[in-house]
Image: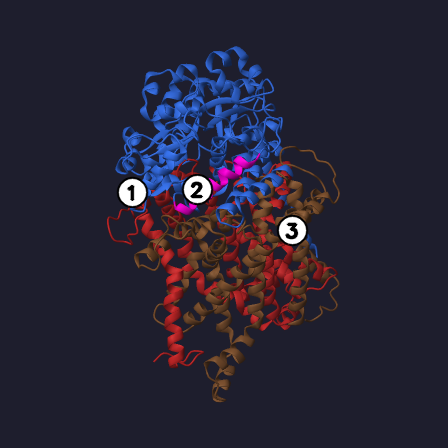
Amino acid sequence: MKKRLLWVMLGLLVTSMLFAAGANEKSVNEQTQNGPVNLVWAGWSGEEEATKDIFQKMRSQYEASSGNTVTWVGWTWANTAQQLLIRLQGGEQLDIAQADIGIFNTIAQTGALADLNEVMGASYLKDTFPESALSVGNIDGKQLGLPWSMASITMVYNPAILKKAGWDKVPTTIAEFEQCLADVQALGEGIVPYGLSTKDSTAAGDFMPWLWTFGSSLFDASGKVALGPKAVECVKWYQNLLQKGYIRMDIGRGDARQLFAQGKMAFYDDAVVAKGQAVKNGVKPEDVVNVCSAMSRPVMHAGDKPQSTMWGHMLVIFKNSAYKTQAADFAKSLVSDDMALEYFEKNGMPPVTKSAANLQVVKDDAYLKGFMQSTETARLEETARMANASEIKAVVTEELQFALLGKKTAQQAVADMTSRLQSL
Amino acid sequence: MKPAGMFQRSAGFRIFFWCFAILIGAFVFLPLLWMVNTAVKPMDKTFTLSFFTGPLTLDNLIGILKNQTIMRYLRNSLLVSFASSFAATVVSAISAYSFSKFRYTGRKFIMGMFMMSQAFPQAILLLAIYLMMQRLGLLGSYWSLLFSYVVFTLPVGTWTLKGYFDALPDSLIESAKLDGAGNLTIMTRIIFPLAITGMTSIAIYGFVWSWNDLLFSMTLVTDTAKRTLAPGLVMTFLGEASTNWNAMMSASIIATLPVMIVFIFLQRFFIAGLTNGAVKG
Amino acid sequence: MARNHGRLSDGQVGFLLVIPGLAVFCAIILYPFISAVLLSFTDRSLLFPGSNWVGLENYRKLFLNVYFFKTMLTTLWFVAGATLLPFVLGFIWAIVLHEQFFASQALRGITLVDWIIPGTAIGFLWSWIFNGEYGILNGLLLKTGLIQKGVPWLGQTTTALLCVIISRAWQMLPWYMAFLLGGLQGVSHEQVEAARIDGANNIQVFRHVVLPGMRQIVNIVLVLGAIGNLQHFDIPWTMTQGGPARATMTFSLEVYTTAFKNWKIGTAATIGTIWAILLLVFNIVYLKQVEESK
């Protein structure tokens, strides 16, 4: 009996020691405000193959010049929003984070972000960034997000394929577009004319600018659901394209990029990062523009404004961070001309500061030019300002798929979309 | 001449045997071969349909082996998985022994509860576990994962080993007690060794559970140095802007190799171990 | 089942032994489960730490949701298919491998590899095989002339779930095979001999000697397999995220989406609680069966 008790006590002792060891690990990381600090930087690009190295450089450069350290916490791009929220709930250290423009608002809604006007200085912001870029991160007068890279998601085409199909210029109206698609399809060779996204959240993302092109939108200015007969027309157009074989089911952004990079697709929607996949597939960076060029979205009637959505990465600093000033300095180093230039050259990320955007190298980049043209007229995705963006997009995608698969008429799908969005 | 198996080698049986051997064999092995195929293809040929024909390269595989980060993920996964495997086996074994050879109030209730370990969606448990671990200060270490994995393997673990222990005659324990052995000695020196095949099976089961886990490891362990393989693979190669199939397949293969080797050695134990106890129960 | 007479502390020993398991169980399952059930009565969102009590509102909304029952149905189809398919295939494979031939041991080992490849990698591999444009399956079918155009297997509601089931079956076949192979090894030779002497053929031997001898294992493997499939998340999520048009949206995906994409922890907890209740009923039935078969 005694021996058994002894074992149990020993077991409990060992267990509690191990617990303590685990707990101690955390306290060792605490620092004082006066010495060198450790910043926690969260996001996704520091994990990915293509950007890992430059993110490492961003950290070491700052570490060398400031004497502080930067710890990177990374997740997958798709999981970043959720993981940030979980981390915010838990209270783990979080100073600065990379936020996609699509999730920025969600994070902002939690009230966890610091006003950069205070942390970085309103005059610094005004001098460094163009107003259009700042407005993306401005909510109710507070600058909650710092624009880091900003461009647009627009249509991209393969000039080589178009030429083969007899098109030297890009189509500008929807009628021309359909004709072009028909010609591309006639080429055969397993080329998919248009890689419109028909699965996951990018389907909703691609749908919106087309919805705008048709004169409709998901919501009106007051936030009420505004899908009407024009939306039904748009969905009918989608169904038509599918029937003719111009678009396909089971195509997501990744599939489209892959097929396009292999020369098996004529058009699809993407942001500047499209360059990455092409380069991976063996195209030289300078030659990318010959196989992948940005174009304006075709319009309903000649003279209409071409539609595109804003895309970008932002930096946010957290209210509860104990090291906001250091985080602000770090952010400034990230958008500095040198760093921005390197980021641009290595990964094609367009710099957004007034000074960096004016660098000759940036201005002359043929590939970037096309995207920047669309950026000037780009709109924020309608869901970008909403906390339940994912949910809305999921509803839109699902109803769209119902219509495309012939399970519902365009009318029914839009009606259901409306009622579901209204009930959210 | 091969010894007569369970089934007579009639014509009908032969047809059945060969038909399915080929069909199921193809189902089981061809996708694996495709993975290997992709891993040894040059990047630009990834999506062609060539199956080991055409140019082959070891660059992808070597690239992964040289990739310090991936190798670190692999080491971390091996560490966590071995630890989970061990812990799961020990906890399942003592729990199963308790259920099998002892009687106390609440025994059946606790047994039932353990079986329910997989009843609730793990995604929901995750949030509460995260908050709890954070309060306990355990988020920086692997403890949260360890506890989680042990619990999720309890149903299979306790059920399998209980079957084993049930099959062991009580006389064994009685005579040991008459010889003056204490409970701990009986358990570790007599009972467990007789159930070694069962314990191996549970060890393997626990290992694979931990090895495959994505959600919990991604959420509960955020320190890059401690990152395990499953989330690591997804994060590195399935990026915002591009997907590197060759690297992903190569990494998956290399990741699986050490486990595979252990398996091929232990599979006899695993297969026998899952069922020996149960059959006689 | 002997009673340990004369040693009052044995019950205590038994209880002590089960404490570690019980401890982790309480920490990882019981406490989170209770807090989750409580959450199901609130409107808790992942965005804010606070929440309001809303009583049965979440439950009401859920039952009114047109897609709730469809999700349940999809889940049942998935569980049925993803349990029976690998079971049958695994059984046949086990029978094949049970006939000791030249490479059977090695093949057994290599089969297990399918099970240890990370689930996400399997999801991606099979997404690739089934892809509508550059998929391997389509490539083969096109080459052999069986089809004219690529079929979007994962892009249409009729085939998406089937494809997900096939992928999961590929992953789990080794697990079923292992159990069933062990079971086959445990079938009594004497009984088989006796049946043969009585003139039974292969099918009769299988039906009347082998299967009954393996009944317990078959039951266990089917039940554990079904419960595992109910939970299963990685493969459907990687392949389709529940699409297209909800064709592959099972309970586990729905819970995940509601909690981590729509931020509605309260609602997700509601779905989870309903699920747990259903499973509890199922488990009670199963445990009764285990008791009876002793």
Disc nearest the viewer among 2 and 3 = 2
x then y, percent, for residue B102: 69, 64
| Pointer 2 chain | A
Q: Which residue position holds label 2?
A: A252
Q: Which residue position holds label 1?
A: B44
Q: Chain C is drawn in which colour?
A: brown
Disc nearest the viewer among 1 and 2 = 2
x then y, percent, for residue B151: 60, 52
Residue A230 in magenta stretch: yes
Q: Which residue position holds label 3?
A: C25
Along the line of sight, the residue nearer the viewer: B243 or A38: B243
Is A118 drawn above or below residue A396 in the view shown? above
Residue C154 in magenta stretch: no
Task: Please name the amino acid that badge 3 sits on.
Answer: Phe
- Tell me which secondary structure the magenta stretch mostly adopts: helix
Secondary structure at badge 1 equals: helix
Q: How far apart are marks 1 and 2 (CA)?
A: 20 Å
In the image, which lettered chain appears red?
A: B
